[in-house]
Amino acid sequence: MVSAPGFGVTVAIPICQERISPVLDTAARLLLVIRRRGREVTRREVVLVPSSTEAAARSMAELKVDVLLCAAVSEPLLRALEERGVCVRAHLCGEVEAVLRAYCARRLAREEFRMPGCWGRGSHGGHCGRKASRPGKSGCKSNSSPRSS
């Protein structure tokens, strides 16, 4: 994925009381932040309506989410999101603004943003069993590349 001039990235974060919601599948609100050329250009909150896995993934794709920063996510929802081109960075925790700043600075791998028990200290394999969702190892090309669509 190569970022074209003027294009941006839409970052989504499920939120609960100003922190990342503990489980994406049951989150009630989603923060959408659009960034272009390294700067935030807009943000808004979206109310998430409980729905099926497929409907939830379709909604995220319709919102044009490029990158989803979240804590726990079920395997079916993860697969459905990835099939729709959403880059999922899971097993994160912390205050929404701090996580967003860390994402923009490419510092999500810092211990303070790891869910407890994830990405074991000093090991490359202790990451809650999912290489694809570990920050920096997800297959997402960069913090600024838009989804191809």
Image (tube, helix red, strand yellow):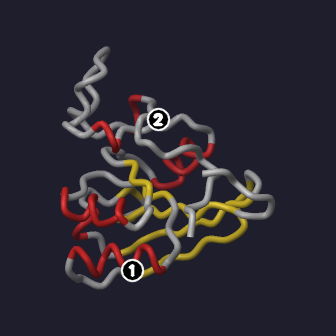
> Residue drawn 24% across and 64% down?
77
Check the picture and name the quadrant holding the C terminus.
Answer: bottom right
Residue situated in front as seen by the camera: 104 or 7: 7
Residue holding disc 1: 59
The amino acid marked with disc number 1 is: Ser
Residue holding disc 2: 136
Q: Which mark is residue 143?
A: none
Residue situated in front as seen by the camera: 97 or 148: 148
Image location of residue 18, percent across then percent down? 43, 61
Residue at mark 1 to residue at mark 2: CA–CA distance: 25 Å
Image location of residue 3, percent across then percent down? 69, 54
Q: Secondary structure at mark 1?
A: helix
> Which quarter of the picture shows residue 60?
bottom left
The amino acid marked with disc number 2 is: Gly
> Residue drawn 19% across and 37% down?
129
In the image, residue 12 sits, relative to residue 97, either above or below, namely below
- Classify residue 111 as left or right of residue 32: left
In the image, residue 43 sits, relative to residue 108, either above or below, namely below
Image location of residue 72, percent across then percent down? 25, 53
